[in-house]
């Protein structure tokens, strides 16, 4: 019985004063992980492209909500989901046969994928895809969205199953990765021979980056550590490596197989067996041969009304430019005389601010409706996963004649995770997605005459740089520093650096690993922007790096293969994925002749593996020579 004399009553202000330092610290930790990438995107658009940020108030509020959501979500993971995963990982292998452990691993992998915040981006990515150019890709993102997310989850589930089985059988990760990558390369080369499937490659490879986020990675690592402890692996610092790698490879295979299925079933939009609600007038078979041309700069064209006013009064009343075409020039009495020339008048393009929306908030946004949809999506993602984890723990304890006691911290953690994901998804739609989309849509203005994002009246602006090649190089450099800076801001990279330095006994320094990973991501995003800017086939940029990876993996030691391949997983955080994906889709929609912007995340994932394995070989060589 509690002693009333020992109970202390605190006022609301006193409670808040105790909690405030803790809340402020967690909030600032999320700000540190997001400030660089947001600041960098805004500064690049305003200073380099010379375009204002549209819907500034809405985006600012959205970014604040994202930070608030991440604070709740990460705290919910720490208090609720992580303790559940660690508890199950510690007692499941000890009291359950192998088939039960594998079944649990599979279901947990599927459930964790549905709970990933970045999965919401996949669900909304179909809006920017043109059905007449890439019908199969359009159908995957619009008609078959549920199937797409499901097969991605199944891919992750199978990866977690295989990763746990690897710990039981003590299999080398190297011997698993080599045949899986070889299979992926073969499927990609086969898909590239079919135009409809060729358009799906970027989406399929990007799905591998979307799955390894803040829910999946901690849960599978907790399970891996628990399994290794029970199996007697004393080096638990190396436990869990490899599952993240497999979880980024198997979803690619799953999406490719789903694409093959719908292609041969002929049930995508425009095909013979299509029964969906969408319609297109031009089939993709003609889209490949009839690439869209550069849109005409109608902002410099006179209207019929302006022409009549000029013929009547000789005065246009607006600024215009005069161009002389043809004719001959002579110097006559100190004057330059042009004869037999065409005199052409063109309107001076309107100043950029006049083209942009003056609204600071998108009037089409309905916060109440968005909040409701975000809450429902969060419930569908978090609640089933928590029910499964609790049911599994209850069943395990029941078999051992123990009672399930759910601590108050776990209950609070689950509630925080639910609140956090709801706020994150709302902030995503209000802030990160519009920011990434408008920057992606505006980047091509560096080298092409296009309509800026959010322009009113269909106005065009001339290219920012006179040389098209110069403009594209500027965009590529932007992509590199975006990837480099955003990666260094990822909290998971800091944790990986500590682990790797411990595993290698200081041979591979934390700072060296962090900058190697960041450089690889920067090069990957720069390559992705190059693909879109020059409209290059993704397969030409994707297959050679993976063939190189096969050689690097074969030459590298097991420990370097473990954390080298897993380093790609830390680059795809909850901030980087939505922004880069939205930016890529925005660039792809704006550049003439480009059908979509998928593929940047895939290239951003392969880059750090190459750099880490390459640096690892150098470090190993130096250590041998000493």
Image (spheres, helix red, strand yellow):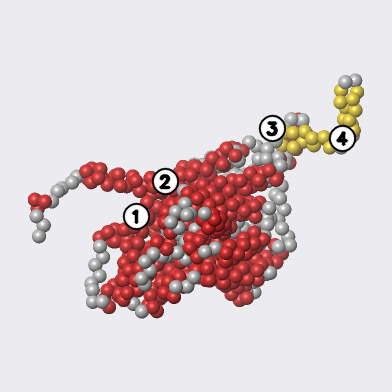
Residue at image position (61%, 68%) is: 185
Residue 384 x/y as whole percent: 37, 68
Mark 4: few, some, or many residues within 10 Å (few <14, many ≥20)?
Answer: few
Mark 4 — residue?
Answer: 341
The vertical placement of 24 against 495, above or below, is above
Give the left or right position of residue 512, taking residue 282 as reference: left
Quarter holding residue 459: top right
**140 or 30, which is in the foreground?**
30
Q: Secondary structure at mark 1?
A: helix
Disc 3 vs disc 4: Cβ atoms closer than 8 Å? Answer: no
User: Which of the two marks, 1 or 3, is nearer to us in this view?
Assistant: 1
Q: Secondary structure at mark 3?
A: loop
Mark 1 — residue?
Answer: 75
Q: Secondary structure at mark 2?
A: helix
Residue 84 x/y as whole percent: 32, 65
Give the left or right position of residue 229, taking residue 355 as reference: left
Mark 3 — residue?
Answer: 318
User: Which of the two marks, 1 or 4, is nearer to us in this view?
Assistant: 1
Residue at image position (27%, 74%) is: 397
Quarter holding residue 163: bottom left
Mark 2 — residue?
Answer: 31
């Amino acid at each position: 019985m509690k002693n009333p004399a020992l109970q202390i009553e605190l006022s609301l202000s006193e409670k808040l004063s105790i909690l405030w330092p803790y809340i402020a610290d967690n909030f600032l930790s999320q700000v540190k992980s997001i400030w660089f990438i947001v600041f960098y995107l805004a500064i690049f658009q305003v200073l380099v492209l010379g375009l204002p940020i549209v819907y500034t108030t809405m985006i600012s509020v959205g970014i604040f909500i994202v930070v608030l959501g991440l604070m709740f979500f990460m705290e919910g993971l720490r208090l609720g989901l992580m303790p559940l995963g660690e508890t199950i990982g510690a007692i499941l292998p000890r009291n359950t046969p192998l088939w039960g452990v594998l079944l649990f691993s599979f279901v947990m992998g599927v459930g964790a994928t549905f709970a990933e915040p970045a999965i919401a981006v996949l669900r909304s990515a179909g809006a920017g895809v043109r059905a007449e150019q890439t019908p199969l890709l359009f159908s995957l993102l619009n008609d078959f969205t549920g199937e797409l997310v499901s097969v991605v989850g199944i891919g992750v589930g199978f990866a977690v199953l295989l990763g746990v089985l690897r710990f039981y059988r003590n299999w080398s990760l190297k011997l698993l990765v080599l045949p899986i990558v070889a299979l992926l390369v073969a499927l990609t080369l086969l898909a590239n021979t079919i135009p409809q499937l060729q358009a799906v490659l970027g989406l399929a490879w990007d799905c591998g980056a979307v799955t390894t986020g803040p829910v999946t990675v901690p849960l599978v690592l907790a399970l891996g550590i628990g399994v290794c402890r029970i199996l007697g692996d004393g080096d638990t610092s190396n436990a869990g490596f490899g599952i993240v790698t497999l979880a980024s490879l198997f979803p690619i295979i799953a999406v490719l197989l789903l694409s093959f299925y719908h292609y041969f079933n002929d049930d995508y939009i425009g095909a013979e067996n299509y029964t969906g609600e969408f319609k297109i007038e031009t089939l993709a078979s003609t889209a490949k041969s009839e690439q869209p041309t550069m849109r005409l700069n109608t902002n410099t064209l006179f209207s019929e009304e302006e022409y009549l006013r000029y013929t009547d009064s000789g005065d246009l009343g607006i600024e215009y430019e005069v161009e002389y075409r043809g004719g001959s020039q002579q110097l006559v009495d100190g004057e330059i005389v042009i004869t037999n020339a065409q005199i052409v008048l063109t309107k001076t393009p309107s100043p950029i601010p006049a083209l942009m929306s003056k609204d600071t908030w998108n009037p089409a946004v309905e916060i109440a409706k968005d909040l409701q949809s975000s809450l429902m999506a969060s419930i569908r993602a978090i609640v089933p996963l928590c029910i499964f984890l609790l049911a599994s723990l209850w069943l395990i304890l029941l078999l051992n004649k123990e009672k399930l006691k759910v601590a108050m911290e776990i209950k609070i953690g689950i509630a925080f995770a639910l609140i956090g994901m709801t706020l994150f998804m709302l902030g995503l739609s209000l802030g990160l997605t519009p920011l990434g989309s408008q920057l992606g849509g505006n980047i091509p203005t560096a080298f092409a005459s296009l309509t800026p994002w959010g322009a009113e009246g269909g106005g065009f602006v001339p290219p920012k740089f006179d040389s098209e090649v110069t403009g594209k190089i500027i965009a590529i450099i932007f992509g590199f520093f975006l990837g480099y800076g955003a990666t260094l801001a990822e909290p998971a990279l800091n944790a990986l650096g500590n682990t790797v330095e411990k595993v290698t006994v200081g041979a591979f320094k934390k700072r060296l690993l962090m900058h190697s990973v960041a450089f690889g991501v920067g090069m990957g995003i720069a390559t992705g922007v190059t693909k879109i800017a020059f409209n290059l086939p993704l397969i030409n940029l994707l297959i050679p790096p993976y063939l190189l990876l096969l050689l690097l993996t074969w030459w590298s030691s097991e420990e370097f293969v473990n954390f080298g391949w897993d380093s790609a997983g830390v680059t795809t955080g909850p901030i980087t994925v939505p922004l880069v994906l939205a930016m890529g889709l925005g660039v792809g929609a704006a550049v003439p002749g480009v059908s979509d912007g998928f593929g940047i995340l895939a290239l951003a994932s392969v880059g750090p593996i190459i750099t880490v394995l390459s640096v690892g070989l150098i470090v190993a060589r130096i250590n041998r020579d000493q």
